[in-house]
Amino acid sequence: MMNNCEQCVVKNKAICSALDPDELIAINRLSRKVSIKAGQALIWEGDDSLIVANVVEGAFKLTSSLEDGREQIIGLLYPSDFVGRPFGDRNEYTVTALADSKVCVFSRADFDQFVREHPDLEHKLLQRTLTELDRVRRSMLLLGRKTASERVASFLLEMSERLADSSCSVVGGQLRLFALPFGRQQVADILGLTIETVSRQMTQLKKNDVIALPDHRNVQILDADRLQDIADSGVGALH
Amino acid sequence: MMNNCEQCVVKNKAICSALDPDELIAINRLSRKVSIKAGQALIWEGDDSLIVANVVEGAFKLTSSLEDGREQIIGLLYPSDFVGRPFGDRNEYTVTALADSKVCVFSRADFDQFVREHPDLEHKLLQRTLTELDRVRRSMLLLGRKTASERVASFLLEMSERLADSSCSVVGGQLRLFALPFGRQQVADILGLTIETVSRQMTQLKKNDVIALPDHRNVQILDADRLQDIADSGVGALH
DNA sequence: CGACTTGTTGAGCATCGTCAAAGTCAGTGG
DNA sequence: CCACTGACTTTGACGATGCTCAACAAGTCG
């Protein structure tokens, strides 16, 4: 199925924004729009890298697993994000849809060649990769050195910031009330904890009036400063 | 001090290998060779990104810390590796020399501009960044989900592979006997453990004849298969 | 030979994971 | 409208893993 970049909802945010109209027509010919159902995998850990894509709609998780089923979420992808491993022959992790999603798929060979011919596109890709590397490295500190309460507090702050970008009712770049786009199990897989530990930390934060939990999915930040203190070094300890 | 790329020991491995002689002369004008003593920092977490560099000699660690002193090693840099944050205004982590080192430094502004004018160089930089992203993501699984013995076993295998690249006496891409380039504290900071736990896991592996420890710095792998099993899922449990 | 740095070992304890049970909620069909 | 179902979450009891603190061993350098 042929794609139409002109009408694409992510044309201004995805790496394609580096291209002019002529180039868009050219890359258009290389792309296919594909729908993925929630829970379905787009790429499997260990497979050859045959495709890359842009996320158009929905959300994906990047995961890596151990043989006995332990799973770590290694990254999250939202509309306009880039998926896959260009310029390499192996996918190092699994990509799974968290919701019904649409992606704009390219064969990796086609894409690699097209990128090499369009330096502005390659530059966008480099910028994204550098930013992602910074983000991933920050989470290494969280996974390697933070306690459970520090992890949960950090996570809530990061979510409130990330969701603020795509919203309006913000206070200082943070949302005070927001809906988590994940269940507890996925939060646990992001933070390297168990579902029970995540749950206990959330109720702990609630008991201390740092947050409120209107229901399982929604979070309201009551004391952002305190939450920040807890995220950084666990000061302002809980009872 | 002016540099001379022609004589540079890493000219074939660093990103500069993308450049032809004319271009080398041009980038040469932008660079300074700087010596760094062991323990000295080249870049501080949180500082503005004013410089980038190539490692010419020695080794560096990338770290991120919490206020109370907990530290996580987020990456390691060896000769020919690239240091710093191009196309961004903030350094997200500290870079410290592990040994007396030499780097080839550029002002970030100069470097950014030069890269944009030389797509082959930008391509090399992208490839490096993508490879580093894969490596960092693999370590997220280790930090988030692996037990202490799995972490130590994974680490020993990775070191034996990495050191095999720069050596000769290899068996199937792995070194059987090698010298760790770090002390126990740094191993702990890489693995997100304490020094005591690392020490205990090493003696445990020794008692089970999986490895031998001629002295504190040297490691000999006696049973690579068993070590691999332990690294992956802790099967072949120890006593 | 001390003083110092680095690594090892041990005892006790806190944190977080495991296992099990009960509670909440949305959806379905009578 | 309500009872039933199944998925998800919370809570509790318990235990293991890994951390803290402390002592000791082994080098290393003056």
Image (cartoon, coloured by chain):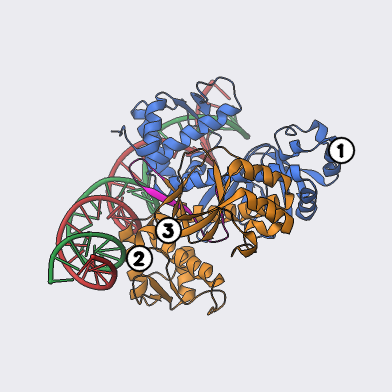
Chain colours: A blue, B orange, C green, D red
Work out whether C22 lies above or below B97. Answer: above
Q: Which mark is residue A22?
A: 1
**Residue at left offset 42%, top offset 26%:** A224
Q: Are marks 3 and 1 on the same chain?
A: no
| Left or right: residue B123 compared with residue C12 | right
What amino acid is labelled 3 in the image?
Leu
**Residue at left offset 68%, top offset 56%:** B24
Which element is circle 3 on?
A: loop
Q: Which mark is residue B98?
A: 3
Work out whether C22 lies above or below B103. Answer: above
How many callouts does the rendering have? 3
Residue numbers of the magenta segment: B65-84
| Left or right: residue B64 compared with residue A85 | left
Residue B115 in sight from this viewpoint: yes
Membership of A111 in magenta stretch: no
Mark 3: few, some, or many residues within 10 Å (few <14, many ≥20)?
Answer: many
Q: Which mark is residue A138?
A: none
On-image quarter of the N terminus of chain A: top right
What amino acid is labelled 2 in the image?
Gln
Give the mark, 3 or 2, whose residue is nearer the N terminus.
Answer: 3
Q: Chain of mark 2?
A: B
Q: Which dot, 3 or 2, sits closer to the camera?
A: 3
Q: Answer whether labels 3 and 1 touch (C-beta < 8 Å).
A: no
Residue B20 in sight from this viewpoint: no
- The answer to which of A111 and B90 lies nearer the viewer is B90
Residue B108: x and y, percent? 59, 43
CA distance separating discs 3 and 1: 50 Å
**Residue at left offset 84%, top offset 35%:** A21
Residue A10: x and y, percent? 72, 34
Residue A231: x and y, percent? 40, 36
Name the residue tied to disc 2: B201
What amino acid is labelled 1 in the image?
Asp
